[in-house]
Amino acid sequence: MQVPTILFISGLSCSGKSTLAQNLAVALNGEKIRIDDYYFETDPAEFEKTDFDDPNTIDVNLLASHLGALKSGTAIESPHYDFVECRYTEFRTIHPQPYLIVEGQYAAYYPALQKLSDMTIFLDVPIETCLNRRLERDQKILHRSLEDSKNRFEQRVAPTFVAHRKVIMENSSLCLSSASQFEWQTAVLAALQLKACQV
């Protein structure tokens, strides 16, 4: 059995993590896993009070156990987190794949996940770029006002990430600055090829 190679992708909200993860999953015949699906379940009435950008709101132990199972050759039932009901509303079976691409703001932050990492990628994208993308996304998907989205980002999202940025960078084996998704993907594939040659 081929032991899955696990890649972690970190970066500020709207830095391009999800797109890169999806592109790599296709290129590597792998499976994408979202850390956002591993939030702790909570009371929907507490939604507005919950800081979903706090890394402590993620059930890291559950995610680590799932990744450990996949690495040992066992399929898992991966949850889907519903942000309306604030709980897991469905599950999908994930079988061990040659590559597992795990993406989330703080993927490189958690020690329990770093123990399972074969490569950790940090997308170092300017805060202003992420803010503009976030404003556009929130309007289209969440129908939030520009003012509300901007306040959330500047008062909660960005400061929390910046506070943990040093640890994330120190734990990352590959740091990618602003570039196209194609250039990012090419850089990751080249790093994986080099890593394979060194084994």
Image: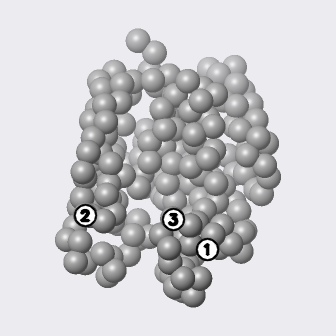
Q: Mark 2 points at which residue?
A: 85
User: Who is closer to the viewer here, 57 or 141?
Assistant: 141
Secondary structure of the residue carrying numbered label 3: helix
Secondary structure of the residue carrying numbered label 1: helix
Q: In this view, does 38 lie to the left or right of 184?
A: left
Q: Distance between the residues labelled 1 and 2?
A: 24 Å
- Where does residue 78 sit, x and y in percent of width and height? 31, 40
Secondary structure of the residue carrying numbered label 2: loop
Q: Which amino acid does label 2 sit on?
A: Glu
User: Who is closer to the viewer here, 102 or 114?
Assistant: 102
State the quadrant of the N terminus: top left
| Quadrant housing residue 12 | bottom right
| Quadrant housing residue 115 | top left
- For marks 3 and 1 on the same chain, the one whose residue lies earlier in the sequence: 1
Q: Distance between the residues labelled 3 and 1?
A: 10 Å
Q: Is residue 122 visible?
A: yes
- Where does residue 43 sit, x and y in percent of width and height? 20, 71
> What number is the disc on residue 141?
3
- Where does residue 89 sit, x and y in percent of width and height? 24, 51
Q: In this view, does 130 lie to the left or right of 87?
A: right
Q: Distance between the residues labelled 3 and 2?
A: 17 Å
Of circles 3 and 2, the one toward us is 3
Q: Mark 1 points at which residue?
A: 135
Q: What residue type is labelled 1?
A: Leu
